[in-house]
Protein backbone atom coordinates (compact mmCIF):
# COMPACT_ATOMS: atom_id res chain seq x y z
CA UNK A 1 0.00 0.00 0.00
CA UNK A 2 1.15 3.53 -0.66
CA UNK A 3 2.04 5.90 2.13
CA UNK A 4 3.22 9.52 2.33
CA UNK A 5 5.04 10.77 5.41
CA UNK A 6 5.63 14.38 6.29
CA UNK A 7 7.62 14.17 9.53
CA UNK A 8 7.21 17.82 10.56
CA UNK A 9 3.80 19.00 11.63
CA UNK A 10 5.08 22.54 12.15
CA UNK A 11 8.02 24.42 10.66
CA UNK A 12 8.98 27.98 11.52
CA UNK A 13 11.66 30.03 9.77
CA UNK A 14 12.62 33.68 9.43
CA UNK A 15 12.11 35.67 6.25
CA UNK A 16 15.06 35.23 3.90
CA UNK A 17 16.12 31.92 5.41
CA UNK A 18 16.18 28.70 3.37
CA UNK A 19 13.30 26.33 3.92
CA UNK A 20 12.95 22.60 3.30
CA UNK A 21 9.72 20.70 3.85
CA UNK A 22 10.33 16.98 4.05
CA UNK A 23 8.32 14.29 2.32
CA UNK A 24 9.02 10.57 2.20
CA UNK A 25 6.92 8.02 0.40
CA UNK A 26 6.37 4.30 0.26
CA UNK A 27 5.14 2.83 -3.00
CA UNK A 28 6.04 -0.30 -4.93
CA UNK A 29 5.38 1.17 -8.37
CA UNK A 30 6.73 4.16 -10.25
CA UNK A 31 5.56 7.18 -8.25
CA UNK A 32 4.20 10.47 -9.41
CA UNK A 33 4.50 13.09 -6.70
CA UNK A 34 2.96 16.47 -6.07
CA UNK A 35 3.06 19.32 -3.61
CA UNK A 36 -0.22 21.02 -2.77
CA UNK A 37 -0.55 24.22 -0.75
CA UNK A 38 -3.38 25.72 1.27
CA UNK A 39 -3.03 29.40 2.18
CA UNK A 40 -5.06 30.82 5.05
CA UNK A 41 -8.78 30.87 4.24
CA UNK A 42 -8.16 29.52 0.73
CA UNK A 43 -8.69 26.18 -0.93
CA UNK A 44 -6.17 23.45 -1.49
CA UNK A 45 -4.29 24.08 -4.75
CA UNK A 46 -1.52 22.44 -6.74
CA UNK A 47 1.92 23.96 -6.21
CA UNK A 48 4.07 21.70 -8.36
CA UNK A 49 4.43 18.17 -9.70
CA UNK A 50 7.68 16.32 -10.10
CA UNK A 51 7.29 15.42 -13.77
CA UNK A 52 7.07 19.10 -14.69
CA UNK A 53 10.50 19.79 -13.21
CA UNK A 54 9.52 23.43 -12.79
CA UNK A 55 10.01 26.07 -10.14
CA UNK A 56 6.83 27.68 -8.83
CA UNK A 57 7.01 30.75 -6.57
CA UNK A 58 10.68 29.93 -6.06
CA UNK A 59 9.94 26.41 -4.81
CA UNK A 60 11.53 23.31 -6.29
CA UNK A 61 11.29 19.63 -5.43
CA UNK A 62 13.46 16.77 -6.63
CA UNK A 63 12.37 13.17 -6.63
CA UNK A 64 15.02 10.96 -5.04
CA UNK A 65 14.06 7.38 -5.72
CA UNK A 66 16.99 6.00 -3.73
CA UNK A 67 15.87 7.79 -0.57
CA UNK A 68 12.17 7.67 -1.55
CA UNK A 69 11.93 11.38 -0.88
CA UNK A 70 10.40 14.44 -2.53
CA UNK A 71 11.44 17.35 -0.33
CA UNK A 72 10.22 20.86 -1.14
CA UNK A 73 12.84 23.61 -1.03
CA UNK A 74 13.09 27.35 -1.34
CA UNK A 75 16.36 29.25 -0.87
CA UNK A 76 14.84 32.44 0.57
CA UNK A 77 11.50 32.17 2.34
CA UNK A 78 8.97 35.01 2.15
CA UNK A 79 6.18 35.85 4.62
CA UNK A 80 3.58 35.07 1.96
CA UNK A 81 4.87 31.49 1.85
CA UNK A 82 3.23 30.85 5.23
CA UNK A 83 0.70 28.11 4.56
CA UNK A 84 -0.12 24.43 4.98
CA UNK A 85 1.85 22.23 2.58
CA UNK A 86 0.81 18.71 1.58
CA UNK A 87 2.86 16.16 -0.26
CA UNK A 88 0.81 13.74 -2.38
CA UNK A 89 1.48 10.53 -4.27
CA UNK A 90 -0.46 9.39 -7.33
CA UNK A 91 -0.72 5.62 -7.44
CA UNK A 92 -2.84 5.46 -10.58
CA UNK A 93 -0.74 7.40 -13.06
CA UNK A 94 -3.79 9.53 -13.61
CA UNK A 95 -3.31 12.66 -11.51
CA UNK A 96 -6.32 11.98 -9.27
CA UNK A 97 -5.77 8.75 -7.31
CA UNK A 98 -3.88 10.71 -4.68
CA UNK A 99 -2.73 9.82 -1.20
CA UNK A 100 -1.74 12.88 0.81
CA UNK A 101 0.59 13.30 3.75
CA UNK A 102 -0.72 14.86 6.95
CA UNK A 103 0.74 18.23 6.01
CA UNK A 104 3.31 20.68 7.38
CA UNK A 105 2.31 24.12 8.59
CA UNK A 106 5.01 26.57 7.50
CA UNK A 107 5.27 29.89 9.28
CA UNK A 108 7.65 32.50 7.93
CA UNK A 109 8.38 35.13 10.55
CA UNK A 110 9.34 38.73 9.67
CA UNK B 1 -16.24 31.57 -11.50
CA UNK B 2 -17.15 30.61 -7.95
CA UNK B 3 -14.98 27.54 -7.94
CA UNK B 4 -15.95 24.14 -6.60
CA UNK B 5 -18.84 24.55 -4.17
CA UNK B 6 -19.51 22.07 -1.41
CA UNK B 7 -22.39 22.10 1.01
CA UNK B 8 -23.04 21.95 3.78
CA UNK B 9 -19.75 23.11 5.32
CA UNK B 10 -20.58 21.31 8.54
CA UNK B 11 -22.94 18.38 9.02
CA UNK B 12 -23.86 16.68 12.26
CA UNK B 13 -25.58 13.30 12.20
CA UNK B 14 -26.50 10.77 14.86
CA UNK B 15 -25.36 7.17 14.49
CA UNK B 16 -27.63 5.30 12.09
CA UNK B 17 -28.76 8.38 10.14
CA UNK B 18 -27.93 9.15 6.54
CA UNK B 19 -25.50 11.86 5.42
CA UNK B 20 -25.72 13.55 2.03
CA UNK B 21 -22.84 15.72 0.89
CA UNK B 22 -23.14 17.85 -2.22
CA UNK B 23 -20.55 19.12 -4.66
CA UNK B 24 -21.03 21.46 -7.60
CA UNK B 25 -17.97 21.44 -9.87
CA UNK B 26 -16.45 24.50 -11.45
CA UNK B 27 -18.23 25.77 -14.54
CA UNK B 28 -17.13 23.78 -17.54
CA UNK B 29 -15.82 20.86 -15.48
CA UNK B 30 -17.42 17.48 -16.02
CA UNK B 31 -15.08 15.36 -13.88
CA UNK B 32 -15.60 15.12 -10.11
CA UNK B 33 -13.50 13.44 -7.44
CA UNK B 34 -14.18 12.82 -3.75
CA UNK B 35 -11.55 12.56 -1.04
CA UNK B 36 -11.81 11.82 2.67
CA UNK B 37 -9.58 13.16 5.43
CA UNK B 38 -9.91 11.20 8.64
CA UNK B 39 -8.76 12.89 11.88
CA UNK B 40 -4.98 13.21 12.06
CA UNK B 41 -4.63 11.74 8.55
CA UNK B 42 -4.02 13.04 5.03
CA UNK B 43 -6.63 13.16 2.29
CA UNK B 44 -7.28 9.88 0.48
CA UNK B 45 -8.99 9.30 -2.86
CA UNK B 46 -12.45 7.77 -2.74
CA UNK B 47 -14.19 7.96 -6.09
CA UNK B 48 -14.03 9.58 -9.55
CA UNK B 49 -17.19 10.35 -11.50
CA UNK B 50 -18.20 11.85 -14.77
CA UNK B 51 -21.74 12.86 -15.61
CA UNK B 52 -23.93 9.80 -14.98
CA UNK B 53 -20.92 7.48 -14.74
CA UNK B 54 -18.68 6.15 -11.99
CA UNK B 55 -15.21 5.91 -13.51
CA UNK B 56 -13.16 4.69 -10.55
CA UNK B 57 -14.52 3.78 -7.12
CA UNK B 58 -11.48 1.88 -5.91
CA UNK B 59 -11.15 4.08 -2.83
CA UNK B 60 -14.74 3.78 -1.64
CA UNK B 61 -15.57 1.69 1.43
CA UNK B 62 -17.43 -1.42 0.30
CA UNK B 63 -20.58 -0.79 2.32
CA UNK B 64 -22.83 2.15 3.15
CA UNK B 65 -21.04 4.62 0.83
CA UNK B 66 -22.28 5.59 -2.62
CA UNK B 67 -21.73 8.46 -5.03
CA UNK B 68 -23.52 9.83 -8.03
CA UNK B 69 -23.14 12.67 -10.50
CA UNK B 70 -26.45 13.03 -12.33
CA UNK B 71 -26.99 14.71 -15.67
CA UNK B 72 -28.46 17.71 -13.88
CA UNK B 73 -27.42 18.97 -10.47
CA UNK B 74 -24.51 18.44 -8.12
CA UNK B 75 -22.56 15.31 -7.34
CA UNK B 76 -23.78 13.60 -4.17
CA UNK B 77 -21.76 11.50 -1.74
CA UNK B 78 -24.17 9.48 0.35
CA UNK B 79 -23.32 7.66 3.55
CA UNK B 80 -26.02 5.40 4.95
CA UNK B 81 -26.30 4.39 8.61
CA UNK B 82 -23.39 6.56 9.67
CA UNK B 83 -21.03 5.41 12.41
CA UNK B 84 -18.59 7.41 14.55
CA UNK B 85 -15.71 6.31 12.31
CA UNK B 86 -17.28 8.22 9.39
CA UNK B 87 -16.51 11.51 11.13
CA UNK B 88 -14.10 13.23 8.78
CA UNK B 89 -13.64 16.06 6.32
CA UNK B 90 -14.87 15.19 2.84
CA UNK B 91 -13.37 17.13 -0.05
CA UNK B 92 -14.57 17.34 -3.61
CA UNK B 93 -12.42 18.33 -6.58
CA UNK B 94 -13.21 18.86 -10.24
CA UNK B 95 -11.28 19.08 -13.49
CA UNK B 96 -12.16 19.99 -17.08
CA UNK B 97 -10.79 16.75 -18.51
CA UNK B 98 -9.96 13.41 -17.00
CA UNK B 99 -6.36 12.37 -16.65
CA UNK B 100 -3.50 14.79 -16.17
CA UNK B 101 -5.48 17.96 -15.69
CA UNK B 102 -5.07 19.96 -12.48
CA UNK B 103 -7.63 19.37 -9.74
CA UNK B 104 -9.61 22.26 -8.27
CA UNK B 105 -10.70 21.59 -4.71
CA UNK B 106 -13.70 22.74 -2.74
CA UNK B 107 -13.62 23.87 0.88
CA UNK B 108 -14.81 20.52 2.16
CA UNK B 109 -17.68 19.28 4.33
CA UNK B 110 -16.88 18.37 7.92
CA UNK B 111 -19.08 15.48 9.04
CA UNK B 112 -19.46 14.80 12.73
CA UNK B 113 -21.27 11.68 13.86
CA UNK B 114 -22.54 11.78 17.44
Image: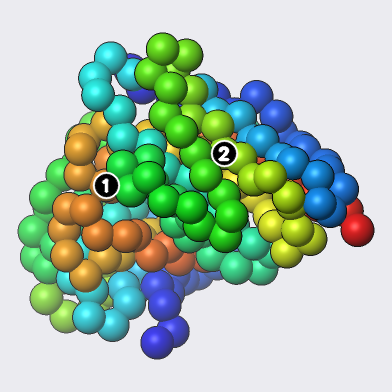
Looking at the image, the residue that sits furthest to the left is B53
Tell me the quarter of the picture where residue A65 sits: top left
Tell me the quarter of the picture where residue A90 sits: top left
**Residue identifier under label 1:** A95
**Residue identifier under label 2:** A72
Q: Chain of mark 2?
A: A
Above or below for B22 versus B14: below
Foreground label between 1 and 2: 2
SS under mark 1? loop
Above or below for B67 versus B84: below
Q: Which mark is residue B95?
A: none
> Could you say which is closer to the camera, residue B110 or residue A7?
A7
Mark 2, other Cα within 10 Å: few <14 / some 14–19 / many ≥20: many
Report whether residue B63 is seen: no
State the quadrant of the C terminus of chain A: bottom right
User: N-terminal of the two: label 1 or label 2?
Assistant: 2
Amino acid sequence: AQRVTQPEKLLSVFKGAPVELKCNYSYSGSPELFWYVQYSRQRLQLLLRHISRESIKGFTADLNKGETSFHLKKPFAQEEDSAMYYCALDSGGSNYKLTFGKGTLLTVNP
Amino acid sequence: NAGVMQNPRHLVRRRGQEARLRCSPMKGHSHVYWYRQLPEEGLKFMVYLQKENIIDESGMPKERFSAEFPKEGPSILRIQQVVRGDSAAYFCASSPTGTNSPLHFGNGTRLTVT
